[in-house]
Image (cartoon, rainbow, N blue to C red):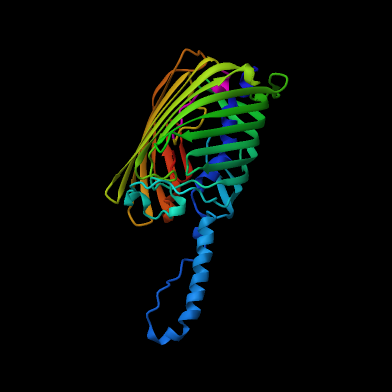
């Protein structure tokens, strides 16, 4: 029974970091773009030559004002809506307030050859040495609630330093989770509440696309296990903690992190959860992710995804990975080893409107008796997209996905992956 309480710990972590994800969805949206467009400084009319001095002063003042805003990196406060469409916890709404910190001027990088395709629409002060969009520093607070009773509040911080040679994300949250886990194909309800701490830092190797770093996760929860009409059962007689450290390697060549058109992302992480880290469990966990984006002309973008997750040792129930696909509820299919393959095609019908079609499959395997090996779990669907912020390639939209059991709707801000 003690293990059941932490079955929702992974979901609790996802909810807690949902605020950070929401912040990340707009983390490359420069607030400076909300300002008025720069005025045309040219004036060739002979009729206004007598006012040229006065106009020049106005234009110079406007130019300096815009330059200060750019140097500040779009500092300001921006409200961010949060839409929750995860079937495992129910539909919900939330909100976040993000503060974009002024961007400090950094040392001029060494001259490099930059592809025009990468720099189009990217202001120089927001680009890295290779012309890609440079993530700003943002701090935010968030809160969310779902119709099933799940809610959470949290604070997060995301930063990029030294011309994007260092990236950091962190979150601290308190959550109350109402969800379901499956013993074989039999659903059981559970409730969890407690705190979550998450830290992630990466360091770029020279001027390459490779980054190395680490992660830390700490979950401290109390919970109840619900059996039909019987009274809820308190689990473990108190709080249960799960604490882990990870080493990670990342290779990222995507043209942007919001809705990529081209490039690849490779992520490899090895986690160790241990009592020596103030946890109650000892086990290993590994994950491998590969995303690849390919643009065909101006109308089509093909995305490919491969995810592999596995555990070894004695993890709690929540520590086992599950199939993550649109159309399949979280926590539905779990085991010691889980693999997912998915593809998505986006068709840019008009300048700011597009449709997407996607399909994926997942499988699970392992030696845990309470889980059944699953293969050929297929889910797919269609969706629409609107280019909300062209300068940042931020697409938003709605997907409808069909899985083995039901159809579900998902609200997307940025790419689904």
Which residue occupies 49% across, 71% down?
60
> Quarter-wise, where is residue 240 in the image?
top right
Which residue occupies 66% across, 27% down?
220
Which of the pair 259/102 is nearer the observer? 102
Residue 284 in picture, x, y percent from top left: 52, 18
Residue 39 in picture, x, y percent from top left: 45, 70
Image mark count: 0
Q: Which residues are magenta?
A: 315-325
Residue 359 in picture, x, y percent from top left: 36, 36
The extreme left residue here reads 297
Horizontal relation, residue 226 to residue 330: left or right = right
Magenta segment: does it hold 12?
Answer: no
Can you see residue 88? Answer: no
Give the answer, above or below, for where 398 lies relative to 178.
below
| Screen quadrant of the N terminus | top right
Give the answer, above or below, for where 210 lies relative to 238.
below
| Screen quadrant of the C terminus | top left
Residue 82 in picture, x, y percent from top left: 56, 46
Which of the pair 120/161 is nearer the observer? 161
Give the answer, above or below, for where 57 lies relative to 105.
below
Which of the pair 136/327 is nearer the observer? 136
Which residue occupies 60% across, 47% down?
96
């Amino acid at each position: 029974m003690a293990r059941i309480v932490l079955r929702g710990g992974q979901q609790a972590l996802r909810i807690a970091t949902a605020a950070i994800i929401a912040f990340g969805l707009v983390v490359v949206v420069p607030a400076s773009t909300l300002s008025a467009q720069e005025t045309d400084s040219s004036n060739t009319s002979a009729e206004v030559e007598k006012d040229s001095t006065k106009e020049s002063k106005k234009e110079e003042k406007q130019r300096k004002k815009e330059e200060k805003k750019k140097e500040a990196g779009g500092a300001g406060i921006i409200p961010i809506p949060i839409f929750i469409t995860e079937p495992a916890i129910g539909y919900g709404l939330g909100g976040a307030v993000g503060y974009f910190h002024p961007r400090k001027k950094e040392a001029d990088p060494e001259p490099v050859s930059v592809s025009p395709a990468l720099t189009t629409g990217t202001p120089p002060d927001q680009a890295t040495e290779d012309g890609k969009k440079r993530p700003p520093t943002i701090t935010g607070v968030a809160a969310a609630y779902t119709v099933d009773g799940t809610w959470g509040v949290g604070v997060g911080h995301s930063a990029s330093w030294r011309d994007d040679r260092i990236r950091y994300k962190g979150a601290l949250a308190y959550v109350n989770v109402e969800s379901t886990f499956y013993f074989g194909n039999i659903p059981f309800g559970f409730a969890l509440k407690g705190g979550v701490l998450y830290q992630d830092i990466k360091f770029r190797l020279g001027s390459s696309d490779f980054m190395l770093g680490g992660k830390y996760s700490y979950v401290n929860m109390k919970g109840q296990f619900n059996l039909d009409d019987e009274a809820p059962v308190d689990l473990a007689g108190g709080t249960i903690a799960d604490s882990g450290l990870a080493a990670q390697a990342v290779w990222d060549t995507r043209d942007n992190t919001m809705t990529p058109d081209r490039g690849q992302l490779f992520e490899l992480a090895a986690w160790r959860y241990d009592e020596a880290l103030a946890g109650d469990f000892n086990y290993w966990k590994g994950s491998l992710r590969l995303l690849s984006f390919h643009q065909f002309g101006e109308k089509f973008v093909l995305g490919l995804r491969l995810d592999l997750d596995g555990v070894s040792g004695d993890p709690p129930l929540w520590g086992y990975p599950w199939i993550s696909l649109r159309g399949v509820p979280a926590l539905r299919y779990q085991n010691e080893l889980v693999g997912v393959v998915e593809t998505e095609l986006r068709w840019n019908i008009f300048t700011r409107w597009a449709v997407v079609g996607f399909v994926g499959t997942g499988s699970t395997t392992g030696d845990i008796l309470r889980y059944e090996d699953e293969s050929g779990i297929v889910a797919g669907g269609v969706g629409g997209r609107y280019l909300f912020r062209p300068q940042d390639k931020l697409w938003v939209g709605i997907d409808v996905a069909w899985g083995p059991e039901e159809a579900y709707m998902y609200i997307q801000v940025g790419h689904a992956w």
